[in-house]
Structure formats: C-alpha cells, structure tokens
Image: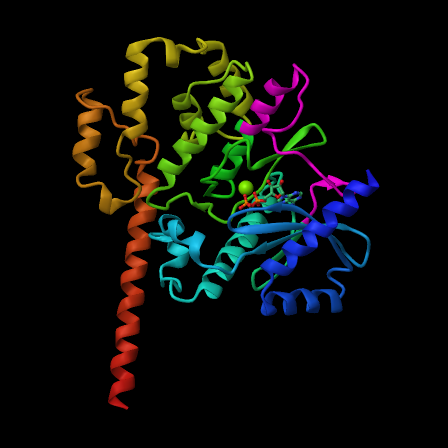
Amino acid sequence: DNQRIRNKDKHDRATVEQVLDPRTRMILFKMLNHGFINLIDGCISTGKEANVYWGESKTGIELAIKIYKTSILHFKDRDKYVTGEFRWRHGYCRRNPRKMVQMWAEKEFRNLTRLIKNGVSAPNPIYLRGNVLLMDFIGSNRWPAPKLKDAVLKSSKPRKLYRECVEMMWRIYNKSRLVHADLSEYNLLYFNDSIVVIDVSQAVEHDHPMALQFLMKDCTNITEFFRKNDVAVMSVKQLFEFITDPTVTEENMDDYLDAVSESVLNDEEFSDPTKIVEVEVFKQAYIPQNLTQVVDIERDIDLAKSGKQDLIYKTLARKKKIKEMQAEKRKVKVKKHVKKRKERLAKKK
Ligand code: ADP
Ligand code: MG
C-alpha cells in the first residue's frame, strides 16, 4: 500500500509541475508561507478544468486544494452559465484567461459559502487566492470519499440517499437560491453514510434565464441514477415540482414527499406511452423566468383559470414574485437615471 502511494506521488509530482504556471506556484508558495497549507501531497483528481490535491493545514486539518487550470480552452463552453446572470452582468473577461479562471474559482467559493450557510452538506470553503481554492477535505486519513457513482452501497442505502438528495436539491433551490446545473452521481460524494455535494463553480442563481432548464437536467440525472439503483423514485416532473412549488416548507416537506411517494406508480413515466409524451412536452416547455419573457401574464392567468391552457409557470407567476421583479426593474431604471445625472453634472464641471 505504502509503495503504491509513493509511486502515485511520483506521478503526481510530474503532473503538478506540468500544470502549475509560475503565478500559481507563487500563490501556493505564499499559502505555505502563511500557514494556510503545511503540506501538499498527492493528487486526488485531474480534470479538464481543475486538479484537486490533498493537503494539510498548519493545524493538521486535511484540505482539498482545487487548482483551476489557467488554459482558456475548456472554459469556452461555459458561457451559457454566465450569460444573463445578474452577478456577472458587467461581463467577464473572455480575453483574459487568467481572470476568467479566477472568476470561476471565485464563483465556486461563493457558491460553497452560500450552500454551507443554508445547511447544505458541501465542503466548507476555507481560502481563495487567484485560481487556488482551499476547502475542507471530504474523506479521512488521506482517503477521499468516493463519488456516489463509485460508492458501494448496501441494498437499503439508495432509498435513504435518494430522500437525502431530494431534500438537498430543495434546500439548494429554496434556501441558497441556486441551481447546481451539473448535479449527478459524479458530483456527489458518499461520506459517513451521507451525501456531500461538490463542484459548484457553474451553479447559477435561481432566476438565471436558464435556471429551470438546468434544474430539469439535474432532476433527470438524479432520477435516472436512483432509478438504476432500484429506488421507487418520483417522476422527473414530480421532483421538479417538489423543488419549485412555493408552498413546500421545511415543516411540511416530509408530508409532501410521503404523499407523493404513495401516489408514485413506479416507472409509469417510462412504461406508459402517453406519459412519455407528456413528460417530454414538460421537459421542453418554455418556462418563463422574468417579466420580459412573460408577454401577457394576465391573459395567461385568465386562460389557466378558465382551464383552456395549462399555466406551466403557475408556481412562479405568483403576484409577489411579479411585484419583486417590477421593483427590481424600477431599481435598475433609477440607478441608470442617477448615473446619467452624475455624468451630466461631471461634464458641466
Ligand atoms: P471537476 O469535476 O471540475 O474536475 P470537482 O470539484 O468535481 O472538479 O473535483 C474533482 C474530483 O476531486 C471530485 O470528483 C472528487 O473526487 C475530488 N474532490 C473534489 N473536492 C473534494 C473535497 N473537498 N474532498 C475530497 N475530494 C474532493
Ligand atoms: Mg466534478
């Protein structure tokens, strides 16, 4: 075993040298100097966009060190996560790869912070500098927890984990106001008989223009994984509705899920042809996210009330939400106005 670790290290060191540009090395050097890291040893994962290393803090706490690669190549297809997001409305530096990668690292740090704050089980972010992110190591004695896809589960486990996962998805959406957008058995770790969510740099705000499409994909991945593991899962549609239904609260969540699971005719979604069509239509349905996308909301609501048309965005089109969005619009207008006035005044001077 020891020998294996040693050999692995040799190989990893080669990878470290390859990946780390001088600036990244300087960042690590400073982290070592300041005692954030005492030791880096062994590579946990090499990915397209980042490598993850095992480390230890000065106080002996195990760390996961995620180093985002500074080559721009792989980040190109990430535009869709950023475009239209309020937090990045001033644009981001497509032309400066280093800046762009730093932005992704920062995004992961902030999203982790938000998840932790709202009681979602995720690695606690510890420190961020440039493209290097330090977080809690999920695992023990240098052994990282396995991904859910690789975990060896006792036959009774998947059911419990499914429920946990569904509640986690609810919490991410309703408490952290985020959509993971890359959720699957690859980005869930299995640790202490529980799941821990990771890899959240691409997670988007719940009101991102594509948030609900991403959420739908997440629901599909999770449903398919647990269905494969013989869990009597809800349909994708039921899961999606559970997560986005504003009447669900922490208090009534269990009752809601119990009620749904009683009504679940397992596999109905795939065995009944009319269901398949219905689900596909639902998946592709255009789900408006903000006022500008809802051309005539009063008409749509009337139609829905009269039963002539199914109001697919019923849970989102509530008056409160609309008022919020109108207020937001007004705020932006006022801000623009103030800015213009300031500019005019500055010119006069
Ligand atoms: P990417 O998928 O973009 O390469 P991830 O954040 O998913 O990046 O990390 C890659 C792998 O590194 C994960 O699948 C997991 O095995 C491991 N890993 C990531 N973060 C941690 C952590 N905090 N603790 C233990 N292992 C981790
Ligand atoms: Mg991943």
Query: Going 30% across and 36% down the picture, which residue do you hit?
Result: 317
Q: Is residue 82 above or below residue 234?
A: below
Is 224 left or right of 128, judged from the image as shown?
left
Q: Is residue 162 above or below residue 4?
A: above
Query: Going 33% across and 54% down the picture, which residue do you hit?
Result: 328
Q: Is residue 330 above or below residue 309?
A: below
Q: Is residue 322 above or below residue 192?
A: below
Q: Is residue 303 magenta?
A: no
At which x and y percent is residue 315? 35, 31
Is 157 left or right of 85, judged from the image as shown?
right
Query: Going 57% across and 48% down the picture, which residue do you hit?
Result: 112
Query: Going 40% across and 50% down the picture, which residue do you hit?
Result: 78
Q: Which region is colored magenta?
A: 136-165
Is residue 126 visible to us here? no
Classify the position of ligand 1 by quadrant: top left, top right, bottom left or bottom right. top right
> Residue 32 versus residue 303: which sits nearer the camera?
32
At which x and y percent is residue 267? 43, 11
Q: Quadrant of residue 345?
A: bottom left
> Residue 137 versus residue 340: which sits nearer the camera?
137
Is 148 left or right of 245, judged from the image as shown?
right
Q: Is residue 137 magenta?
A: yes
Instruction: Report the number of numbered marks.
Output: 0
At which x and y percent is residue 263? 45, 10
At which x and y percent is residue 346? 29, 85
Colour scheme employed for the rendering of this structure: rainbow
